[in-house]
Amino acid sequence: MTVATAARGEERARTGWLLSAPLLLFTAFMFLYPAISVIRTSVAGREEVNAGGFTLSHYTDFFTDELYLKALSNTLLIAVLTVLITGVLGLVYAYQLTMRPGLRQLQLALLLTPLLVNGVVRIFGLQLGLISVNDLLMWANLVDSPLGLNYSFTGIVIALVMFQFPFMAMAVYASLSRLDTTLVEAAQTLGAGRMSVLARVVFPLAVPGLVAGGVLTFAAAAGTFIVPAMMGGGRVNTVPQMIYTSVSQSQLWATASAFAVILVVVLVVPIMVGTHFGNRDTAGVR
Amino acid sequence: MTATLDAPAARRRPRRRERQKISVFTLVITVLLLLPLVVVALAAVNPEPYLLFPPEDFSLHWFSAALDYPSFRTSLVLSLRIALIVVVVGLLITVPAAVAVTRGTGRVRRSVQLAMATPLVTPDILLALGLLIMLTQLSMSNSLVGLVLGHVLVGLPIALQVLVAGLAGIDPNLEHAAATLGASRIRAFLAVTLPNMLPAIGSAALFLFIFSFDNVSISLFLSAPGQTTLPITLFQYLENNADPTVAAMSTILVIVGVAVALLLGRLGGLGQLAGGGRRRR
């Protein structure tokens, strides 16, 4: 390497750092400052923004209060159910679209379009739609009383599945792009049943997508405020709702911060496990 | 690797020419996902002063009622203002960074990737609470700064991803050629690369706009009396009553979302949504 090319390489590196500096500084500041603020406030002696002192009582309070623990178990149950349902639906969707790719471009575009519409609006539309479903079922004499799809635990899961399905479907679909459709046809010609083809040929290929989509869905489902707030009708308490009400209604800054830290820790463990196994699975294929 | 991949693809190609089958399952799912948007629009065109689905008549007067409703109008203007500032600030940060990622050294690229991973894995609620504490500590909780900063952070990963994908498709040799012919590096970039980047910049701007305009999680914490963005105003309105006025305002938001989707489809950015842009609601 000549002196000139070395100097050019150094200049290239310097320009690179210079150009990326605004982004790096912005994200570092915007991530570190709020994170440190929340952690500091969560162990503050008093329920104020700039309170000094140190106590772990906001954490111990959480784990000794039945109401809080119930909210935590609600949050986790909602997240797990959402992951399972979107996983199954996403797998079938991606498999069907791979095997029958008619109108593929249009369907993918329509799948992504709702993601660009406001979440509050989509939940409002879902509420109106579920009311109509109830009316229809009662009119057809299929049920005697309203199903309780709105303003319930079920409603929260339905809304979250609606929100997260496109991400899961796209993640699994990307994984299945490596699927050779002739392989499936060959297996079927040789007498393999539908389920056995799914289990032995399709599912193993879909695992990386399912894991990636699952991690995304789990975090989103456990961290959402707006979905339980609108679909739960005040009946189902979750951790994000407690964080919001602690701050907005009671100014309990330390309590809210401790809840936020607990939520993140509870979320990070499954996400790290998922990403770890997801990476291991994809590593073999690549 | 490519050789083994090509073989089955070549064998399959003749079959592709046949009319492709359409899956009923995927069609049903697509319709179900779009249905809530259609229901909102249908509820808004019913002339009666209560929500009725399906509508029995057609009228657009709830749309003018929605735009005349003071709190809807002020928060719509506020949301648009914030979104436009977010687009400008976001592009100023991401365009140079995208150039650094595609043209810079590996170390720069890895640093930027790491920086982009952090907002993606941090739950919005932690971010929002942290921002609120930060702004309160700095006595700025009643300014729009927090909303702008939070929305920029939320839109950065997808904007950068779109720009990097766009830049990767541009041959750096074109710029080198211009430089060899005597143009300065900045002039070569502005005259050769930047014009080719415009579709990607357009997509990035649209994503920054819509992620800010639609944002609920950050805005919820940072909205104060007098600075409530439109999604939060709708949420608060819906807590008390659901009527055709709010359905009409919601329909306007559906139209905005669909318009952005169509524009992104034209610019080729829509597919990026699935790649890494996280659900931000």
Image (cartoon, coloured by chain):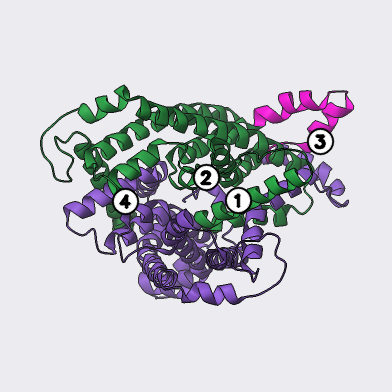
**Label 2: which residue?**
A231
Instruction: Name the chain under label 1.
Output: A
Q: Is B161 above or below relative to A100?
A: below
User: What residue is rendered at 23% in x and 42% in y?
Assistant: A253
Amino acid, disc 4: Thr
**Label 1: which residue?**
A126
Answer yes or no: are tags 2 and 3 on the same subunit: yes
- Mark 2 or mark 3: which comes first in sequence? 3
Q: Is residue B231 left or right of residue B128?
A: right
Residue numbers of the magenta segment: A176-205
Determine the residue located farthest toward the left in the rendered image: A53
Circle 2 sits in a helix, a strand or a loop, which is it?
helix
Amino acid, disc 3: Thr
Q: Is B143 above or below relative to A171?
A: below
Amino acid, disc 1: Leu
Instruction: Name the chain under label 3.
Output: A
Circle 3 sits in a helix, a strand or a loop, which is it?
helix
**Label 4: which residue?**
A27
User: What residue is rendered at 26% in x and 44% in y?
Assistant: A250
